[in-house]
Image (cartoon, rainbow, N blue to C red):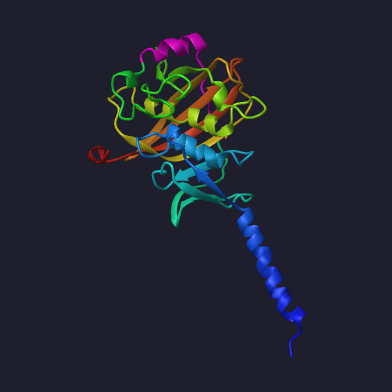
Amino acid sequence: MAGVGDGAVPLVLMLSKLARLFSMIESVVIDRRFRGPPESGNGGYVAGLLGRYYSQPAVVTLRQPPPLGVELTLAGHGTDHLELLDGETLIAESQPVSLDVEVPAPPTFDVAREASRHYIGFSDHHFGGCFVCGPDRPTGDGLRIFAGAVRERDLVAAPWVPEESLTDDSGRVRREFLWAALDCPGYFALHTDQPPKIMLLGRFAASVEPVLRAGERCTVIGWKLGRDGRKHYAGTAVFSESGGIVGRASATWISVDQARW
């Protein structure tokens, strides 16, 4: 007859496995403040919700439009591979990556401010309520990064002064907001010579240094990297007030059926 101890070993192993599993899962809710299109999360911000867990560069692939106000599951916390899930539906996944992005020299803050005056989104914007680049968002609510073409250079630029609600307990801008700031300027870099078409962020690789503080006069830039059919590639970077690179990224944007949006 089997003793009590014989059955206890499998039970202990099962409980240990369950404990490890639950330690790698947490809930995430994307607030409406952080929307891109009206009913889904801004791609850069959502990518940053995964990317903030990496100390090295990471790449996030967005599989579905991230829903707002819904309890999502972040699985794999503590591992190299993270998944953001809505029930059984995969919304996004991430992993470490080797990021090789050659960043152009930035314009000055004043030049970026002048370029921003010519931001095409002021007159033609599909998602005016976007958290990052929407002109309909008031100061203190959206990031209001309005990247316009820089004269005699193949890039767009915008000034950005982070405000207090974006910082952590140490007073530094949180990683997910640096990822967000790196998002939309790449889209507008793809539209310096044509009216804006609806594109969605498909893949986003970034490296950020959480050293910015609220009130710093930062500069954000974006530039074209190429195209392959419906896929469009862009690079972006964020510079501190002193001119140091605090974030760099490469993005894959996907052209979509304009009628569906």
Q: Is residue 29 visible?
A: yes
Q: Quadrant of the N terminus?
A: bottom right
Residue 159, compared with residue 200, is above or below; it is: above
Magenta span of residues: 102-118
Viewport quadrant of the C terminus: top left
Q: Is residue 117 located in the magenta-colored stretch of the structure? A: yes
User: Residue at the spot x=53%, y=40% of the render?
Assistant: 49
Seen at 61% across and 15% down, the residue is 242
Between 157 and 223, the one lying in front of the other is 157
- From the viewer's side, name the closer residue of 203 and 26: 26
Asked where in the image residue 41 lies, by quadrant, the reply is top left
In the image as oriented, which residue stretches furthest toward the bottom? 1
Which residue of the protein is positioned furthest toward the left in this rendering? 259
Query: Residue at 73% across / 75% down in the picture?
Result: 8
| Vertical comparison of 72 with 254: above or below | below
Q: Is residue 256 left or right of residue 19?
A: left
The reply to whether residue 58 is visible in this rendering is: no
Residue 221, given in percent of the width and then of the height, sits at 47, 22
- Give residue 42's position: percent from left, percent from top: 43, 35
User: In which image quadrant can residue 130 be found?
Assistant: top left
